[in-house]
C-alpha cells in the first residue's frame, strides 16, 4: 500500500472520464476545506494482508488528520504510485472499509468516484508535515 497524503486548506475535483469500463456512471463536482487528502495506491502484495493494510491505512490517515486538527478526509484512488497493482475489486473493497470505519469514528469522508480520471485542484499547506508519503 502506498499513500501520498496532504493537508489541504482546499480541495476540489470534477469527474473527467471513466478509466474502468464497468465503473458506475458518475458525474460529480465537489469541494472541501481543511482536509487530509489521501491518494491511495493498493499493490498486489496487499491482497495477502487485507486486515494489516486496513489497520495501517486508518492509522496513517488519522495521524495526519490529527496533526492538523481536522475531521475531514478525502480518499482518492491514485494508481500511479507503483507498477504493482492490486485488483480493482480489492482496492475498492479496502476503500469501502476504510471509509466506513473513518465515518464510524466521526470523520467526514469524501471519496472521488472509483474508476474515473478526475480534474482536481489541491492547495497544500506549507508545513513540512502537510506532505507525507507512506509505504507499507
Image: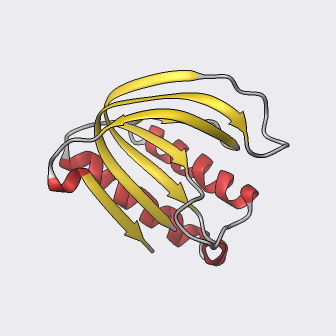
- Counting the numbered discs, the total is 0
Query: Which residue is nearer to you in this view: 72 or 102?
Result: 72
Give the farthest residue toward the right. 22
Q: Is residue 71 left or right of residue 50?
A: left
Q: Residue at x 66, y 74 (%)?
A: 44
Q: Position of residue 83 (x, y in %)?
A: 62, 72
Instruction: Give the answer, above or below, for where 30 lies relative to 99.
Output: above
Q: How is the image coloured?
A: secondary structure
The quarter of the displayed image where residue 119 is located: top right
Q: Is residue 74 left or right of residue 25?
A: left
Q: Position of residue 121 (x, y in %)?
A: 41, 32
Give the farthest residue toward the left. 127
Q: Is residue 21 left or right of residue 112?
A: right
Q: Residue at x 75, y 56 (%)?
A: 89
Query: Which residue is nearer to you in this view: 129 or 14?
Result: 14
Q: Residue at x 28, y 46 (%)?
A: 65
Q: Residue at x 74, y 44 (%)?
A: 19
Q: Position of residue 36 (x, y in %)?
A: 34, 43
Rendered-image quadrant of the C terminus? bottom left
Q: Position of residue 1 (x, y in %)?
A: 52, 68
Amino acid at each position: 500500500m502506498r499513500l501520498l497524503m496532504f493537508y489541504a486548506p482546499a480541495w476540489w475535483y470534477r469527474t473527467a472520464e471513466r478509466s474502468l469500463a464497468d465503473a458506475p456512471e458518475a458525474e460529480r463536482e465537489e469541494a472541501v476545506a481543511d482536509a487530509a487528502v489521501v491518494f491511495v495506491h493498493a499493490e498486489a502484495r496487499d491482497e495477502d494482508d487485507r486486515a494489516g493494510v486496513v489497520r495501517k491505512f486508518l492509522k496513517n490517515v488519522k495521524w495526519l488528520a490529527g496533526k492538523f486538527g481536522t475531521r475531514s478526509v478525502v480518499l482518492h484512488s491514485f494508481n500511479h504510485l507503483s507498477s504493482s497493482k492490486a485488483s480493482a475489486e480489492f482496492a475498492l473493497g479496502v476503500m469501502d472499509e476504510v471509509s466506513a470505519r473513518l465515518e464510524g469514528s466521526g470523520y467526514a469522508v469524501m471519496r472521488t468516484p472509483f474508476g474515473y480520471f478526475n480534474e482536481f485542484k489541491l492547495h497544500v499547506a506549507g508545513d513540512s508535515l502537510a506532505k507525507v508519503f507512506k509505504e507499507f
